[in-house]
Amino acid sequence: MFWQTTRFCIDLAQPRVMGIINVTPDSFSDGGQHASTRAALAHCERLVAEGADILDIGGESSRPGAPPVSLDDELARVLPVLDGALTLGVPVSVDTVKPEVMRAALERGADIVNDIHALQAPGALEVVARHAQAAVCLMHMRGEPATMQERPFYSDVVAEVDAFLRGRLDALVAGGIAAERVVLDPGIGFGKSVEHNLELLRRQAELLAIGRPLLLGWSRKSTLGAVTGRAVGERGAASLAAALAAVQRGAQLVRVHDVAATVDALKVWRAAGLGE
């Protein structure tokens, strides 16, 4: 299976690692560490050297309770980093919900739009459709970051996530975005309880039946803290375990903070023949 992006056709015969670059002061795990353009670009270069297959740049935190960021602030955070990242020889994704940021990023040559709102904002689908080969990641989220963890409820979380992602994929195809440009993210930690997240992992194979690659983002999430009792900065081992479990259940992409460790873990996984 392949994922068509603006500049690259990504071969997903082996799982790929998406490295996270948060150009924010308030992200749940590394807020403020890469808030300056210089620090963010240095982090991009480090992640590529560690083996990242894709870079994902975000200028607005989506942690539970996060306040919205103005358009001007997000553009000022993201675009200078994007310009530098585009020179590093790997696909570059921009993590945003704003059509205006999507348009500016794609006009500069961004390969992927990673949208936690699944292109539901007015005009977002049309922006991506106008860029004939730009890729998109559609994520499921119930509610908004500010309120999404207030008593989330599902009759069947896997069935409801499945139905939402199928519906959004159909909407994109109807809007002129080829399915080959789309990957799907069930949204671990976005409007879901610990048990919801674990159920999505246990039954992840059901989501593969949609027919598009899955991107999973377990890295340092609060569910891992609930399971292990570890603080955010101490969830590296749990994040690796979750990433490998997701890959073993068919995920083609994992979005992570700890690129080097994840790349090494996947090398061992492949060497053992577990990916065959």
Image (cartoon, rainbow, N blue to C red):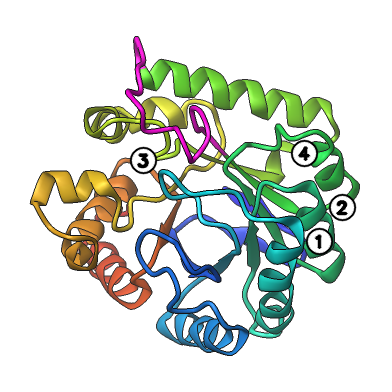
What residue do we see at 32% from left, 23% from top?
A: 151
Is there a contact, CB below 8 Å, between mark 4 and mark 2?
no
Q: Are marks 4 and 3 in contact (CB under 8 Å)?
A: no
Q: Which amino acid does label 3 sit on?
A: Gly
Which residue matches tag 3? 189
Q: Which residue is the site of mark 4?
A: 178
* Cα gap from disc 1 to disc 3, whole angstroms: 28 Å
Circles 1, 4 touching at the beta carbon (< 8 Å): no
The answer to whether marks 1 and 3 mark residues whose Cβ atoms lie closer than 8 Å is no
- The residue pinned by badge 2 equals 131
Question: Which residue reaches farthest left?
Answer: 229
Rendering coords of residue 124 (x, y %): 79, 41
Q: Mark 2 touching mark 1, by CB under 8 A?
A: yes
| Image coordinates for residue 203, horizontal then vertical, percent | 30, 27
Please provide percent x and percent y for residue 71.
75, 57
Identify which residue, 166 or 102, lies in the foreground.
102
Position of 261 with respect to 145 (left or right) is left
Answer whether residue 37 is magenta in the image. no
Residue 132, image x, y percentages = 87, 50
- The disc, 4 or 3, on the residue closer to the chain's N-terminal end is 4
- Mark 1 or mark 3: name the one nearer the start of the chain: 1
